[in-house]
Every structure is written in structure tokens, then in C-alpha cells.
Image (cartoon, grey):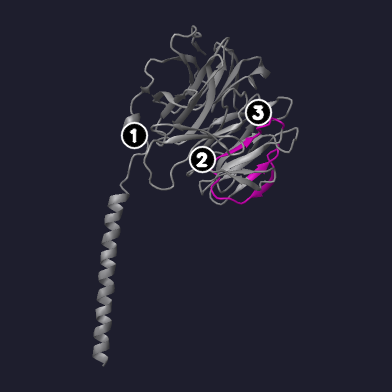
Amino acid sequence: MGRATDKGILALKRVVVAIGVVLLLFLVLLSQACFVPQDVSKPPPVLERAQVLVGGDAYEKHLFFSGSQLGDTSQILAGWPADRENAALVIVGNQGAQFLSDDGTLKKYVRFSQAHFCPIQAVPLNKEGNFGFLTRDPTWACAVVLYDRDGNQLWSYSSSMGVDDAAGGFMSNASTSVFVVGLNGWGGIRLLDQKGKEVWKQAGGNIWHVEILDAAGDGNGKILNSDARGELVSRNDKGEVTLRYETGGYVSNFALVRWGEERHPTHVLFYASPTFPAGGTPRFRVIDSNGQRVAQLEAPLGDLLHRLEGTSVSFKKETATFAALQGDEVIKRSLLYLFDVRGKMVYQEVITEGCRGIAALPRESEETLLVGCNNKVWEYRPAGSAARSKPVKQ
């Protein structure tokens, strides 16, 4: 009986060892098949060279502005806050801000007191029109920093969890702005007052992107954020979730955009990646502030780049076109899309730079489109339209 038991135990051990060997071989093969190191700094083959993929010669492109003190363009705004500096538009980069006339002439330059690797954007500070500059999308690389209109640091906020994004705006009909911060991991979401002090915090996982949307323009904005579950949610001034938008997929990055003839961004643009393998052409979606779908735009190659922003632009009087810009600073590539009034893509261009910042610039009888890249801004208009403005170099 004892020998039989010993033989049984020995046989069981051999089976266990055999299973372990097979499992080990399986894991080795799996690692070789699935985890081949790749150079993430290289663009996909279709994005290797600069080219117009759709639209041919339908649009003209020329250099609107270049300046070595700009850095990577983060934002382009026509009107406010440039009008506070007697200028037509402001171009904000990660080194400073350039206030320009509508022909690209430099009116004022603001240099930030500290250089950053992350984007910086203009934000309102009070309802009288005063403004500052806020670091955005730091991806843990830098703290949230607020600068005054002259580039001097007002305060800095950081967290051990790492900051994913930050945004400023008006809530609760207050006369001064507040700032929402999305943290990585399980750091959740925080609200800061104008001095950079925490007002409240709410739980959440990987708050990828945040915005404050004041659709009515009355100072009662709401917070929008994406999170680890790929949801796009709306929060009130206490940080409580009030609405979960129907997106049709996983959302990490999104943007507040103008749509149609509106002068103030009240819509949301995003790409929702499928939560399961799915064929077909990638699509951008546009929804209003209540989550109602306004447009679905077919965007070939739209799943290759992560960050997305856009604006409406009236190239011809009373005819609104929509422009979308995707970019990636790591692989130094961008895609520019133009859609007609029916939502059909009429122009697509591969740009061999990591571009950020897109805006419509009002002209006498039309608007032109500005796209910001490294130390420069490109201007687009339909071929054969009014004479272009003279390129200006600082």
C-alpha cells in the first residue's frame, strides 16, 4: 500500500512538472509573438512624408508667421484675449505668447518665466477680461502652473499621482475663474481656486482630459472629463457626475469646438475608438453640450493619432466648413482634415510636424484657417481666393 501511494505521488509530481514546462514554453512563445519591441518614435508608413492625400490643389497654404521664441504652438485665439493687447490674435507656445495683427505683424511678445515641455494655453481670470496662461496636458512631466498676462508665475500645483490635464473657466456664476485638475491613477479630479488651493476632490481613475464648458456664456460652466473607463462625463460645480454621454466607444481625448456659425465653442469633438475589433472607416463625432449627436465625420487614418482639436471656418461668406487637426509630438506628425457643410471630407494633409492650435481668422469677406506647428503658423484658404497676407518673421 505504501509503495503504491509513493508511486502515485511520484506520477502526480511528474504530471505537475510536465504541465509547468508546457506552460513556461507557452509563455515564452507568447512573449516573442506579442511583445516584440517597437520604436514608438517612428510614424506609421502612411505618415512618413508630407503630402496632400485628398483635395489636391483645392486649398492654398502659406507661412503666416514664424518666430524662434514661440516653441511648439499650443493654442491660437482670434479676438479675446488679443484685443486686451490691441492685437487681432494670440499664438501661445510652450516658451511664450505672440500677440499679432491680422497680417501677422508682431504687436507684443510675452515670455514665460519658466520653460515647459507641455502645452500652455490662455485662460480667463475674471469677467472683466483679464487673462493668464495655464499649463495643459502635462502627462506627469510638469506641474500645473498659472502665469499672469506678462508671463510671471502666480502659483504651481502638483500631486504624487501625476497630473494628466488641467483647465480653467467660470462656474457657479462667480466673478473669478476656477481650475479643474485631472490626476493619473486613482488620484481623481480636483477643483482649485484662483490661488491654486484645493476646493474639493472627487474620486476617479485616470482622468485623462478635462475642460470647463460654459455653453450659455453666463458663468455657470460645467466640467467635462474622460476617464479610465473611456467614459465622457459631465460634472457640476461640486464635482458630482450629472451626465454620462453616449459616445459609441472609448474616449480619452476630446476638444471644445465651434460648430456652424457660432462664435463661442459650445460643442464637443472626439474620436471614440471601438471597444472591440471593428472594421470600417474611423469617424470623428460632434455632440452638443447636452450630449446630442450633431455630426459624424468619416476620417480615414483618424485612428493613427491621439490628440484632436477643431473649429468651424467660413471660407466663403455664410458657408461654414469644419476643420479638424490631429497631432503627435512624439512621432512629429499631424493630420489636417477639412469637411464641407454636408460633413464630407474634402481635404486631408499629412504634416511632418507635431502641430497643435487651430483657429479661424476673420477677414473682410471670409475667414482663413490658421494651424500652429513648431515656431510657425500656416494659413489656409481656398485656391484662387483673395490675395494672401504677407508672411512675417520675427
Relative image position of residue 87 (x, y in whole percent): 63, 15
Earlier-in-chain disc, 1 versus 2: 1
Type of amino acid under label 1: Pro
Q: Tell me: 60 left or right of 146.
A: left
Circles 1 and 3: CB atoms closer than 8 Å: no
Circle 2: is it few (<14), some (14-19), or many (20+) Cα within 10 Å?
A: some
Measured along the vertical axis of the image, is residue 347 above or below residue 13? above
Please say whether residue 328 is visible from this viewpoint.
Answer: no
Between discs 3 and 2, the one toward the N terminus: 3
Q: Residue furthest bottom?
A: 1
- Three-letter amino acid code at disc 2? Thr
Q: Residue at x 39, y 35 (%)?
A: 281
In front: label 1 or label 3: 1
Which structural element holds mark 3? strand
Q: Which residue is mark 3?
A: 132
Q: Give the residue at the far top of this rendering.
A: 387
What is the x, y in percent for residue 141? 52, 39
Q: Name the residue that disc number 2 marks.
A: 139
Asked which secondary structure carries label 2, the reply is: loop
Residue beneath label 1, please? 44
Identify the residue at horizontal 28%, vertical 82% (top origin). 9
